[in-house]
Amino acid sequence: MIELSGQLVPVKVDCDKEEGLQKKYNIRAYPTIIFADGKGKVLGKIRGAPNAKYLTEKMQQYIKVNNELVQLQAKFEADPTDLETGGLLAGVYANAGNDSLARKYIKAVEKADPDNQKGYLTEAYLAMGDHYVEQEKFSSAVKYYEQAYTTSKDPAAVSEARYNGALAHFESRKEASDKSKNYEKRLLAAKEQLDLLLKMAEITDERKKQAEELLVEVSKEIEAYNTRRGDKGK
């Protein structure tokens, strides 16, 4: 990791003080690690505190993308069975907010590996989920996070997907009436993902803290919902 760090320019930002950057990059959770090129274009993003192995893998990927994007595109066009390159490109375009290209590469990789057995689409699923969260399209985000945590074999990725999925479920409640069954369904889905996340043996201390804090919020909202429903029945 130390050798890889020499190929990056690390910048630590306090988003409570740098609100412009927080809005520009749609920072919704701390810590968030963003990989960007020299012009500030986002190549990748990690929410939460990753373990060293996961972070090292992401550093390697995005250094490669930054240096070889055009070559990677040509490589996949020449060999559509190169699932690793296809998955990497799908993640890059999802992070860049390019829906059409992201879906193009996701579809191409899913055609050869519909169950994501190789794991090359996990990053793309996470990135698409993040992209839709940033657009406040929470129901769409949930679908991609679900694909990530149901198909990935990487505990760090599953942890990230479950937490972000729970957060998206919780935020998606705003799309429904606060006394409807659909509202309750989204709250319970958020609680279910947090409960499963907290049972994971590989969960980091930081992620555990985040999950516990969110679970408190979700539980309070479930209690408030039940109170509203009870009052309605009187």
Image (cartoon, rainbow, N blue to C red):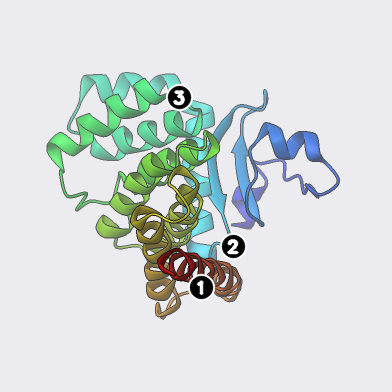
Q: Earlier in the sequence, mark 2 or mark 1?
A: 2
Instruction: Give the distance between the C-alpha atoms of the residues marked 3 and 1, in whole angstroms.
Output: 49 Å
Which badge, 3 or 2, comes first in the chain's sequence?
2
Residue 6 location (% of width, % of height): 67, 46
**Hey, which residue is sitting farthest right in the picture?**
17
Q: Whole-percent x and y of residue 39?
A: 67, 23
Does residue 73 appear left or right of residue 47 in this picture?
A: left
**Residue ID at (69%, 31%):** 24
Percent of width and height locating residue 9: 72, 41
Q: Nearer the viewer, residue 196 or 223?
A: 223
| Residue type marked 2 | Ala
Residue placed under numbered mark 1 in the picture? 223
Name the residue type under label 3.
Answer: Leu
Mark carried by residue 69: 3
Judging from the image, what secondary structure is the residue with disc 3 in?
A: helix
**Tag 2, which secondary structure?**
loop
Query: Of discs 3 and 2, which sits in the foreground?
Result: 2
User: In the figure, 188 relative to 74: above or below?
Assistant: below
Label ID, residue 49: 2
Q: How dense is the environment of label 1, judged by Cα within 10 Å: few (below 14), some, or many (20 and up)?
A: few
- The disc labelled 1 sits on which kind of residue? Glu
Q: Nearer the viewer, mark 3 or mark 1?
A: 1
